[in-house]
Image (cartoon, rainbow, N blue to C red):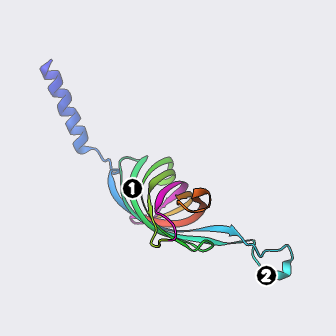
Amino acid sequence: MKKTLLLCLVVFATQITFSQNTYKKPYFTGSLSTTFAINEDYTIDPDDDEPLLIPGAVLFRLGAGYQFDRRWQIGFNAGFDHHFRFNINAIPLYGSLRYNVLEDDNDNFFVEYSHGKMWRPSSKYENGNYYGFGIGSQITGESRWNLILRIDYHRKAIQGFKNGHLDSISFGVGFSFF
């Protein structure tokens, strides 16, 4: 029994030592996103040169994290948001959990959940909580740089703001560096 256990332990240790698992690694990420709002000055008249949708906010994010295996990643992120319509600036600090749903030649389709705190640099509104859920695609580059295209739903819980929160959907482009 002891010889069998020792043999299994040696085989297991050898397998771990010589395995080619390259999924466990740290990464850095960044993105630039925008939200869109309905233009209040838009009319159906084609001569008014008013677009239907106008940018509503600019969202900038930087983060660092760790990929555990080919499916799961965890990250810690910071950002800066400016909402034009409400003249609101916000600094979200949050953690994110990402799951790669599909993988094809190291390109990934993923879902991601984010949760954290949001600080306000002015006293116009209180600090609050930050929540996010997104889907996206990571396209593998020639080197360690990858392109990320994403759509995210954001909820910024702001006391004193109408309805107590600011919801938005953003479209963004970003990068990851492994």
- Outermost residue, right side: 45
Residue 178 appears in the rendering:
no
Closest to the observer: 72 or 58? 58
The dominant secondary structure in magenta is strand
Q: What residue is pinned by disc 2?
A: 49
Of the image marks 2 and 1, the number of the one nearer the N terminus: 2
At 62% from the left edge and 57% from the top edge, which residue is drawn?
163
The local crowd at label 1, few if under 14, some if 14 to 19, many if 20 or more residues have their Cα within 10 Å, is some
At 24% from the left edge and 41% from the top edge, which residue is drawn?
16
Residue 38, image x and y in percent? 72, 68
Residue 42 located left or right of residue 116: right
As displayed, is residue 143 above or below residue 67? below
Q: Which mark is residue 75?
A: 1
Task: Tell me the quadrant of the picture where the C terminus can be found.
Answer: bottom left
Q: Is residue 145 magenta?
A: yes
Task: Tell me the quadrant of the picture where the N terminus can be found.
Answer: top left
Residue 45 located left or right of residue 134: right
* SS type, badge 2: loop
Closest to the observer: 125 or 81? 125
Q: Disc 2 marks which amino acid?
A: Asp
